[in-house]
Amino acid sequence: MGRPQQEPGTAAARDGVPWTHADALVAVAAGVLDAVGNLLFGALDGERGPGLPVLLLALLAALPLLARRSRPVAALAAVLVPSAAADLLGPGTPHFGVVLTVALYSVARVSGPATTAAAALATAVVTVLAQGHFRVPAWDVAVSAPCSALLVAAAGLAVARWQREVAANRQLLADRAVAEERRRIARELHDVVAHHITTMQLMAGGARANLADPEVVREALVTLESSGRLALREMRQLLDVLRAGDEPDAVPPAPQPGADDLPRLLEESRRAGLPADLTVRGEARPLPPALGLTVFRIVQEALTNARKHAGPARATVHLTYRPDLLVLHVRNDGPTPAPAPPPPPADRGGHGLIGMRERAALHGGTLTAAPHPDGGFAVHAELPLPTDESADLPAQLPSPSPEPSDLSTQLPSPSGESTIPSTEDLR
């Protein structure tokens, strides 16, 4: 409980030193303020001044503050020694220096109540003894130092508790966003899998009714095999996410969009005020429904974010087909957002970015979103492509709700009767 915890955002500086520029500024400012304070206290007491050794000790006491983030307890102990020496050489005016305040606050920020209480007690005792020159202290010295140490320790513990609550709330919101996005992805995959299973049953029924025509039966069985293979792959993806507590749709769902719907999406973006262009490189080929839906949703979310945050800008969408990889790059040329302090590990961007990353990871891909070096913001996704046999399947499959006349045209019956299973059979 009393073990120090790493303070968020307190990694070592990139140049290898164990402190940041902010730590150096705090140490310099605290040392200067303590030195000026000693001069003022000496003037108020009617003396000529605290002397050069006292000023040097006040400045020397600020040096351990450079390690206040990585080793707060050791830094406080190192601060107490020169501070006590300065008090012994000084007139004994009751005060609680800025350096002591910063050191004790740093301990309270990253330590538990037990460690903080021990540090506050040690600070108060050493300060009282030093300012009283190891004699019975005056009442103002005996009261000011313990009260100051108590207030500083309480403030540090309160801030630490508040930041833990903020971090917990961020984690809760991020987990909730991930859960909601996974449920939405699962709903969409459920529709895709249901379509493939329906197609398999239709093809099996058609093959059974056309046993007299081997060629028709063979084509039906090939389609049935490919559809089953694709349905199994989509089912594995479906099992990776959770779908719980969903209410049945009031109306039949519309067909899910895919990569072929990107021109329509960009046209809607232009009408909404964000000009957007689409560039396709490589040999375009049909994508599995789930992968095409992921491409559509990533572009949709990236354009939505650009309209919200980029201001007057223009967006470009690049879709590159490689032999085994689909590369998607969406960039806007709006103003680059100002750099912000690094968020806690649990809070990695907004909920829209969480959803895009979840969709990319579902297919074994990666997604990055960051300011572009040439200005604006860019979303870059790399999605593995399936084998050609499975990728060509969506172009051969019938629509999710095929009409009986369509399928009977594809699989004629020798007797001229309809070869489509009845609604009761499909159920």
Image (cartoon, rainbow, N blue to C red):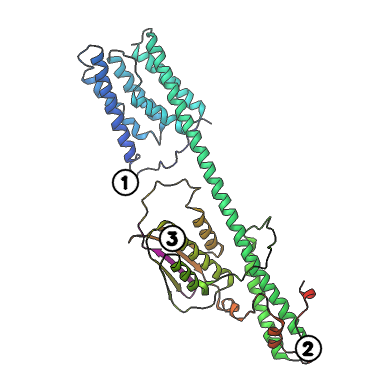
Q: Image check: 9 left or right of 355?
A: left
The residue drawn where x is 44% and y is 73% is 320
Instruction: Name the residue carrying label 2.
Output: 417
Q: Residue furthest left?
A: 48
Give the mark nearest the N terminus, 3 or 2.
3
Q: Position of residue 58 (x, y in %)?
A: 28, 24
Of discs 2 and 1, which sits in the foreground? 2
Instruction: Name the residue carrying label 1.
Output: 15
The residue carrying pointer 1 sits among few (fewer than 14), some (14 to 19) or many (20 or more) residues within 10 Å by Cα, namely few
Residues under numbered marks 3 and 1 in contact, where contact means CB atoms less than 8 Å apart: no
Distance from the alpha carbon under mark 2 to that under mark 1: 80 Å
Q: Position of residue 230 (x, y in %)?
A: 63, 73
In the picture shown, does residue 210 fall above or below 236?
below
Amino acid type of disc 3?
Arg
Q: Position of residue 133 (x, y in %)?
A: 33, 11
In the picture shown, does residue 420 fall above or below 370?
below
Give the mark nearest the N terminus, 2 or 1.
1
